[in-house]
Every structure is written in structure tokens, then in C-alpha cells.
Amino acid sequence: MSTFKGSQARKPRLSVISKGPLEVPSPTEADWPKDDEKGFAFRDLGQDLDSLPQPYRMINKLVNHLFDCAWEVIEEREALREIEKNRIMPTIYPPVAEIQLNKMPGGMAVSQEYLFIGGIKGFSIYNLHSCKRMYVWEKFKVDVSSIWATDVGNEVLIIPVDELGIVRLFYLYKDSLFLIKAINETVGISSFQDDPSKQSAFVKMELSQSGDYAAFLFQGAGDVWLEVYKLPKETWLKEVEHPLSAVNPKKKTKQLQLSTPDPAVPETVEPSLGPTQSPNAIQDLNICFKSDLKLSPPVFVMKIKPPKPIAGTTFKSPLEIISKTEDYCGLGSGQNHFIKDVQWQQHRELFYASHKKYLDGEWEEEPLSKATFHFFTNAIAPAPVEIKSSSGAASILGVHWTGSHNFFLYSLNKILKDKTDCDNVWPCAAPITVSQTSSSSSYLALACEDGVLILWDLAQGFLFGVIALPEGCFCESIHFLRFFLVHEGRNMYPEGPVKSEMMCVVLCTNASLHLVTASGTSGPTSKVLVERSVTHPEEAICTVAPVPALPGMVLIFSRNHSISLLDVAKAEIICAFAAPMHPPQQEMPWKPLFVISPHHPYFLLHGACPDYIATPTDGAKDTPDSVFCFNFEDYPLLKDISKNCTISQKDLEGNQAFSQMMPLEKRCEQLLQKSFQKLLKSQTKEHGQWMRLRRYSIFLQKENLKK
């Protein structure tokens, strides 16, 4: 058996040319022997090993292969150890405050200066700056599972959803809380337990940017549908500012003031984890609930159901199809065709015959189709002249359903008697898997099943372009960033409005992260920010979230419960945040519950208390939960970025590197000025040459006269 001689580098067999004993050649080539090359013979150095009988020759090859594999593993581990040794760990910042809860929160939401946390049979309102609880509402029959909040002018609209799937609307005006309506509460809890099909369960919702409209997706009794409501926010404001005189004055305001928590159910705040809170903290209000004033309910606009499966035509002639599509409604949806039932049946039979071996057997019941929907302004589909809509108000609802190629557009300027047919259809080449809009609803991104992104500029009404992700990358989520510029090595937000400049980060199913940008009529581009982690699978990205208070920064949540802040301009990790401890028995993939304030430098994260480590015998109900608050302005690396994150329009106009950010009129003016200066310079040069020629001509004339 041969010994290991570093056979990894041995690929081809070595051979030498030999004839008799080896001799040292003479210094000069003239003294070398002139033997014929035919006298030389090739000798294989591995011939001695090949002469071994079986099975020893096979054993020798197996042992050599084993040594080669072991050596490869050793080299890989040495390389990884060297990388880890040179790896620079980012600065880790702890939270500045902690809110201790007695149960896992049922969702969190931030609006203006308030933090809303869903809890046991209700929700709590906290001061965002001081993390102090201001009010508790606990009048539901079951616990809250999720909660939303949005700005409605200077007021706040709160939308909690309980475990039965019932959606309720609350209106917070200064120090008063009003219950507007329960959207889908049609039966009691006892009836729901007896027959769940009688209750429509909430699935998801979406609010327009201006707070004028809300859309709710419900399912029940084997069906799924989308309900759209108009929110009369101007009417609500008038009703709370000028209550009707018809309200019974004997009814006293039902005020549920915050009392001292029960020691058995602790819910405290520990601000000692960080420095002093922000000096801009709002004054704690004595919020009260008022039941003597009933606000106007939302106005039902329309109900949308999934598109029907394409079936045989009901038209008798092509003329009926043409007349049906004269108003372009539904054009592109595939519903208006002239294919008969017999043709569909023949197609199904042919398909089944071709794929019979794959189709035979038991199949799981296909889940109900789910909708993804967004609100847009009237830039992509102008409203009729007779309909007046306020500037910035939503007027279009875009919807796409699971497994569908089509993106449907519905006008919100409808009345109840109007049909809920779609007004326009954007068909795609592959089924749409993910869609997302920017915070201002100016940009739209559609991700298809084949890894292609379609980018729209809705404000200007044109297509940015289509870009394909790298091979093997498929979109999992899209997150728009507010457009920023790199000025003197720092990310800065332009002070003025920005048009046709789009940035978004795309998280793929293989945990890679990409930056996609588009500008004006130039095609979109893509850049890899984070590669797929092969050597450290525990560091794979599971969630991404932009940070509006920090230009060009996104939070990255990894599977190992680590949280990092990434600069997308440099593709570098700036710092990390101390993630809360979790029970060791939790083996499911981490789905972090967090919320980021859109207007303030705050980031809140749910987790277990750091001074408590659960054991396998501990019950889940005994595990104390907490919400940790991170203030970016309390950390040295982020303090200056958060406070000085805008660049003035004057600085942009004076910097030629940012000429694309100037208004069109200003750019045209600068272009004309440059052209005029260039022309003037050229004319001045020509005039100087003419003057030299003129002087030379006069000199020649004088010389001729002298002669």
C-alpha cells in the first residue's frame, strides 16, 4: 500500500524519458550525445503501483481518495478559520428602554407620537418617546391578534383585529378615543363557535396614503372577497370638534383612566437600559373613551371577488365580443373570448392523456385565492371630468390574485349601482408573486414567477423598464427606499421633491439581497448587496426593513436572531443591535415582530425579557414578554446621520454631480448658458484671429508702399 504524498496535486500521471543510467550533461550542447530519439523509452512512475494485484490496487486508490478528501476538508477549515480571524465584528448597541408585558403582543403599530400594542381583550396606547403607557382598552371578547394605525390629518385611525377576525375602527382625537364601527361583526361569539361559516374572517387590509380609503380582504363559507370603504375623515373631524346638540347631555363620558397595574400581571417600563429619553417627548395626555358620540360609519364603495375561471364562451357571434369590449373594460383579462366548451373539453382531455402518470392519485384541496392590493392616485387612470377628487387622494385600486398573470385596476369613483368590473388590466408574461408600492404611491414594482421585475413610475404614468434577477434568484419581498444621494461620503435626502428616481431592495428566496434602481428613461439596474450565505447558513437573511430616519439604511434580520444595519450605498454593515433573548425550545424559523417609526428615529422589537431564560418545563404563559425600544439618536455612529440627513436645493444646484436633481427649467437654463458661453468663446477666438490677420495685412501694405 502506498503512503500519502500529497496526492491532491497529482492529477495526470507523471512519465519520464529514460535510457540507461542518468548522466550529468556537459556544459556545452556540442558535447551532448547525438543518439536517436527512438532509443528512448517512456517509464511510468506509477507502474509499480499498477503492478499490485487486486484487491490491493483498489484499496490503494480508495485510501488515496480518502486522503485527498480529508486534505480538502482541512484546507476549507483552515480558510474559514483565517476568514473568521480577520473578520471585523460591528459595534452592537443595546436597547434604550423596555416595556414589559404579561403576554405576547398581538401586533404593534406606530402613528405620530403614539405606539399601539395589541393585548388581552384590547390594546394599549403608549407614548413613543417615553415608552409610558397612556391608556388601555380591554372591552373585546377575545384577544387582539393584529393592529394597524395610520395618520388621518392630525388625528389617528386605529384598526385592531381580534382572534375571531373581527375588524373595528377607532378614532383618536387629541385626548378622546371613539369607536366608529365593527366592519364585519354580524354574529356573536356563541354563534361563531356553533357555526363558523356565518362569520367572515379578516385576512389582510390596506389603507391609502392619504387615509381616504380602506380595503379589507375577508374569507368565509369557502369564499374570499375584497371590500372597499371610503373613510369620511373630514366628517369625523367636524363631528368631534362640533358635537351634535342632539346628543343626550345626561350621558357621561365613559373615562377609563390608567390605574396601577396588578402586581400579578406586571406591565412596567424600564428606561434604565439607556440614556435619558428624547427631550422632544410629548406631554402625556389623559386619554378617555367617549361613547356618547357616534361618528359617521365608513361608506361602502364596492365588493370585489376573484376572477372567474376561464370557461366556454356565452357569446353567439364575434360582434357581441366587440360590442362588449367597446369601452375597454376588462380588455386583457381573457374573459371575453370565442372559445366554446367543446374546445375546452378537448384541451383538458388531451392534457390529461399527456400527463396521466402525474395527475393520477390523491391531490390536496387547492387553497383559496388570496389578493394583494394597493391604492394609487389618478395619474395612471385620470378620473372623469364630472368627478372632483382632492389632490393626492387615492382614486385607483390595483389588485392581483394568487396565481394570476393579470394586475387589475378598479376606479374608486363609483356609486353602489355601478358594476364592479375592472377598468383596466395589465397582463404579465408570468404569474405575479409579489407587488409593492412606494410610501408615496408614486412607484410600483411587480415581481413575476420567472424572476422578472416590472417597474412603473405611476406619478408620471410610464414604465421604468423590466429587469431580471440573477439566475436562481426569485423575489420574496420588495422594500422601497426613499431616494437619497451620496454627498461628501454621506447619504443625504434631497430637500425638494424628486421625480422619476426609484430605489428598492429585493430579498430573494435564497436569502440574497439586491438593490434595484431606475432613473428617468434609463433602464433599471441591479446590484448585489448581500450574497447567499453558504459558509454560515445561520446568518441567512429572513426579513428586511428600510429605516426612513437614516438615508440609505435597512435593517437586516438573520435566522440566528441577529439584527444589523446595512448601508446600501456601500454594501457595508454599519452596526448591530442587541437582539432580545428567546426561549431555547423555540426551533421554528424566526419571524420578528417589530415596527419602525416613519417620522421619528425609533425602532421597536418584541422579545423575551433578558433576565429570564425559559426551561423546557416552563409554560409559554409564564414567559414574560417585552418590547424593546431603540433610539438611533442615542448611538454615536448614528446620531449625526439621523439629525443631518437632508441636503438643501441650493447645494444641489451648485454641485454639477447632482444635475439630474435640478428642475427641468433650471437644467435647460444651465444648458443654454453653457451653449451661449461656448459660442461666445468661439466667436471671441475667431475675432482675435481676424484681428491678427487684419494687422498683418496692414503691415504688408505698408511694406509694399515703402518699396
Image: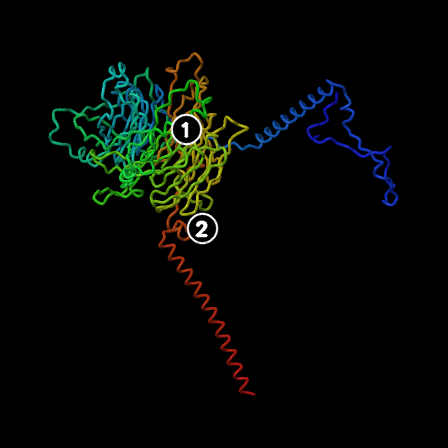
Q: Residue furthest top?
A: 617
In the rendered image, the quadrant that contains the N terminus is top right
Q: Is residue 540 left or right of residue 154?
A: right
Q: Which of 28 and 451 is in front in this view?
A: 451
Asked whether disc 2 touches disc 1, contact meaning CB atoms under 8 Å apart, the reply is no
x, y percent for residue 629: 38, 29
x, y percent for residue 237: 20, 35
Report the amino acid beneath label 2. Answer: Ala
Are there few (<14), some (14-19), or many (20+) residues within 10 Å of tag 2? few
Q: Residue at horizontal 20%, vertical 34%?
A: 417
- The answer for how far apart the CA atoms under marks 2 and 1 are is 39 Å
- Nearer to us: label 2 or label 1: 2
**Residue 130 makes an appearance in the image:** no
**Residue 409 makes an appearance in the image:** yes
Image coloring type: rainbow
Circle 2 residue: 657
Image: 669 above or below 14? below
Q: Residue at horizontal 73%, vertical 21%?
A: 57
Q: Which of 687 and 570 is in front in this view?
A: 687
Report the amino acid beneath label 1. Answer: Pro
x, y percent for residue 468: 46, 38
x, y percent for residue 707: 56, 88
Q: How many labels does the image show?
A: 2
Circle 1 residue: 95
